[in-house]
Image (cartoon, rainbow, N blue to C red):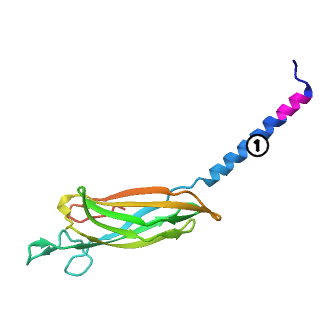
Amino acid sequence: MALTNEHKEFLLWIFQASAILLLFCAIIRLSLIAKPPIVTLTDLTVPTNQGGNGFSVQVHDEVSQNYTSTTVVFSLVITNPNKKGILYDETKLILSQNGSVLGRSSLSPFYQSGRSSVSNPVLLSADQSISAENGMLNLGLETTIRYRILNWTTKRHSLSLEASVPVDEDGIFSIGE
């Protein structure tokens, strides 16, 4: 059975409508894809017990011959490269060295608008001493995020990052430029 012109025109119309619909769906899908936030560790400071903001190799208590707790101060700069806002759940921060957890901290849930940067200062009380002789200092970040598109929020996306801070020749933890 041969196709008539009417059948051919109808099939061509179905093909064109399907192609336009698929193209429209692809454009919508691509516009909804969000990039993950960019997290930067800045201003790492391990205060000494002598005052000031120098980097301490270890804080030592002469009386008990034990190492005392050290407060690590740093700032997390979170940049949202999207036009969409991001909702952050509780952000957990873990400071470790050579596989041993030194301390934990967290940031409360917050919202970040599109194409903006947020600086979060963090005070972390280390349970163990921090030694420059032991090598790298590692900071882990774990949270879940949701993207806000108009009045709708996406499902939760897991975000797990780790930064390593090396020790320079002088025994100081330094963040590379």
Q: Which residue is mark 1?
A: 20
Residue depicted at x 67% and y 46%: 26
Bounds of the magenta span?
6-12
Is 9 a magenta residue? Answer: yes
* Horizontal side, residue 133 vs residue 44: left or right: left
Q: Position of residue 4 (x, y in %)?
A: 91, 24
Main secondary-structure element of the magenta-colored stretch: helix
* Horizontal side, residue 59 vs residue 2: left or right: left
Residue depicted at x 59% and y 53%: 33
* Horizontal side, residue 33 vs residue 53: left or right: right
Q: Position of residue 28 (x, y in %)?
A: 67, 51
Which quadrant of the structure image shows residue 101?
bottom left
Is 120 a magenta residue? Answer: no
| Neighbours of disc 1 within 10 Å: few (<14), some (14-19), many (20+) | few
Instruction: Specify whether residue 83 is in view.
Output: no
The quadrant in which the N terminus is found is: top right
Amino acid type, residue under disc 1 in the picture:
Ile
Nearer to us in this view, 63 or 144: 144
Residue depicted at x 17% and y 61%: 133
User: Circle 1 — which element?
Assistant: helix
